[in-house]
Amino acid sequence: MRAAWKPLMLVCAVALATGCSSMGKKSEGDVAIEDHGMGTGTDMTQGIGVGSGTFNGMSIDDPNSPLAQRVIYFEFDSSEVRPADRDVLTNHAAYLRENPQAAIVLEGHGDERGSREYNIGLGERRAQTVRQILELQGVGPQQLSTVSYGEEKPAVDGHDESAWSQNRRVELIYPGR
């Protein structure tokens, strides 16, 4: 276990050292930490890159804002954030950095397969992975809290892959919203 932290700490130190000198520059490659894909390659000087456009200023309440996407989905028995969800987390990290008074709850969930205890642990690992990504993008730890519901709060009822795939998730909850 201790050996796994050494590469993580090395990557964090490199990211901190290079982050200061390359602010506003696009990265040639993404930084990967334990295969969680932490890099963003997003140009923060012109707003947040979303698809082919950018926007300045973010409204947490605008349904057309990239911040409207508040669910991160996971593969079966995995706590690795998929590449498709990295931009979602980048957008929320930018909002939270720009609004240090804002807080977010990361709710980890699992599907119905596996024991209750296992699913609680898996939901916690998923929430902690999302937390780690947000912290590495500059969000203050005091802004983040995590909770795991395991299989207890399914988004979709059902006993097939279609339902299970929607239940394996972390929901990003802004209290009071």
Image: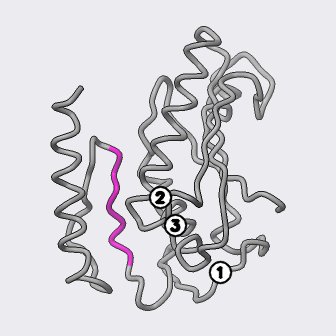
Q: Amino acid at mark 1?
A: Met
Q: Residue 33, position in %: x, y?
A: 27, 48
Image quadrant in which you'd find residue 23: bottom left
Residue at the far right in the pictured view: 176
92 relative to 131, above or below = below
Q: Residue beneath label 2, please?
A: 134
Q: Are marks 3 and 2 in contact (CB under 8 Å)?
A: yes
Q: Look at discs 1 and 2 and give the one toward the viewer.
A: 2
Residue, far top = 115
Q: Could you tell which of marks 3 and 2 lies nearer the N-terminus?
A: 3
Up the image or down, 37 lies above or below 120; here it is below
Q: Residue at x 66, y 62 (%)?
A: 103
In this rendering, position of residue 174 left or right of residue 84: right
Identify the disc placed on residue 93: 3
Q: Earlier in the sequence, mark 1 or mark 2?
A: 1
Q: Which mark is residue 58?
A: 1
| Quarter-of-image position of residue 38 | bottom left
Q: Secondary structure at mark 2?
A: helix
Disc 1 to disc 2, how far (Cα)? 17 Å
Quarter of the image where one finds residue 24: bottom left
- The alpha-carbon separation of the residues under discs 3 and 1 comes to 11 Å
Secondary structure mostly seen in the magenta stretch: loop
Q: Bounds of the magenta span? A: 36-42
Distance from disc 3 to disc 2, alpha carbons, whole Å, reads: 6 Å
- In depth, the one of 3 and 177 nearer the eye is 3
